[in-house]
């Protein structure tokens, strides 16, 4: 778990516009196209700013009363709802006067990343993504919380898991900016057997930290199509399937009774002995040590 650090600059400057205490940062985890951090900032007037990326803020504690410059030079007082979300696309971010401390999860998505997700959608959004503030969206909030938790723990579930969350976050962002909705009667597609075989063979190397883009390239499809077709073929996401492969290999090694748990964790692609134990207990119902004793 990460310790808090004092920050005065970074990818979230356009939204923070001043010093803050940061934690749970994904910087250094080799995530491409997106960053998440938690921040705590004191209440002070923040002037109008310009952002070059998509920034989303989720207020994690009861938000303070804020004043927004809805009209240049004129501030209007507004009370935020619990778990309020602010969505700021590239462009101008209005001035704000918070009347107290703010605690929030921040996610920044590079325009190139969002565009790459957009071109993969079957039905592309039909409206521009605009600045929105103080709306509540449980699914969007949950994705941000999961991504933040993964960053706070140092990325133990791997880049594939983080990519999956960020991809879903970008799709939510795109649909929030439009009225486009997928046809619920779309036929479920599956991966051709030879391509599915190639993907699964790639996943057999359990010690490699695979990402979503690598598997999509292996399949010959875009990330969004690959995700949908893999689930149509296997009944689960790529991350869930990879986790099952790792657990089955761990069970096999436990049955051999000659491996240390720390060695099993490394060979099966878990980030640590503790990570193996937690996932094993969550899925199997007992710890690896208990599983071996019960054999």
Image (cartoon, grey):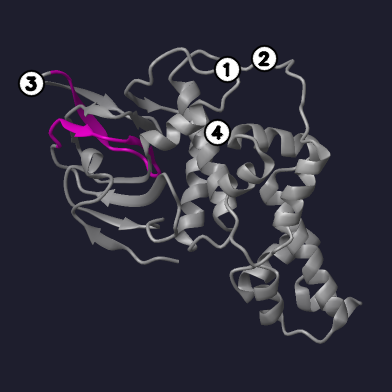
Quadrant holding the N terminus: bottom left
**Magenta stretch holds residue 132:** no
What are the residue bounds of the magenta stretch?
46-71
What residue would you read off at disc 4? Answer: 139
Left or right side of 256 for 6: left
N-terminal-most mark, 3 or 2: 3
What residue would you read off at disc 1? Answer: 123
Q: Residue 243: which numbered mark, if any?
A: none
What residue would you read off at disc 3? Answer: 73
The percent coordinates of residue 108 (x first, y second) are: 36, 41
N-terminal-most mark, 4 or 2: 4
Q: Residue 183: which numbered mark, if any?
A: 2
Left or right side of 284 for 119: left
**Magenta stretch holds residue 48:** yes
The percent coordinates of residue 2 (x first, y second) are: 40, 65
Q: Name the residue: 79% across, 36% down.
A: 192
The percent coordinates of residue 66 (x first, y second) are: 23, 31
Foreground label between 3 and 2: 2
Quadrant holding the C terminus: bottom right
Q: CA distance from mark 1 to mark 4?
A: 20 Å
Left or right side of 15 for 264: right
Asked if residue 126 can be seen in this view, the reply is yes
């Amino acid at each position: 778990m990460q310790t808090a650090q004092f920050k005065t600059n970074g990818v979230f400057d356009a939204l923070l516009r001043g010093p803050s205490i940061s934690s749970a940062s994904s910087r250094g985890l080799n995530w491409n196209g997106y960053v998440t951090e938690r921040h705590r900032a004191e209440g002070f007037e923040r002037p109008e700013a310009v952002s070059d990326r998509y920034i989303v803020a989720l207020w994690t504690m009861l938000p303070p009363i804020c004043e927004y410059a809805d009209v240049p030079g004129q501030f209007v007082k507004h009370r935020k709802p619990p778990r309020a979300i602010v969505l700021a696309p590239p462009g101008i971010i209005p001035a704000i006067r918070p009347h107290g401390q703010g605690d929030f999860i921040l996610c920044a998505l590079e325009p190139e990343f969002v565009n790459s997700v957009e071109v993969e959608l079957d039905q592309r959004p039909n409206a521009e993504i605009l600045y929105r503030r103080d709306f509540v969206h449980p699914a969007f909030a949950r994705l941000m919380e999961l991504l933040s938790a993964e960053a706070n723990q140092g990325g133990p579930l791997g880049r594939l898991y983080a990519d999956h969350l960020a991809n879903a976050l970008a799709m939510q962002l795109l649909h929030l900016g439009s009225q486009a909705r997928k046809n619920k009667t779309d036929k479920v597609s599956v991966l051709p057997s030879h391509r599915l075989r190639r993907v699964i063979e790639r996943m057999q190397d359990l010690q490699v930290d695979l990402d979503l883009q690598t598997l999509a390239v292996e399949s010959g499809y875009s990330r969004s199509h690959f995700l949908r077709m893999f689930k149509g073929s296997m009944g689960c996401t790529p991350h869930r399937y990879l986790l099952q492969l790792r657990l089955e290999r761990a069970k096999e090694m436990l049955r051999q009774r000659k491996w240390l748990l720390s060695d099993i964790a490394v060979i099966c692609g878990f980030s640590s002995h503790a990570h193996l134990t937690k996932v094993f207990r969550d899925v199997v119902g007992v710890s690896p040590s208990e599983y071996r004793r019960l054999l």
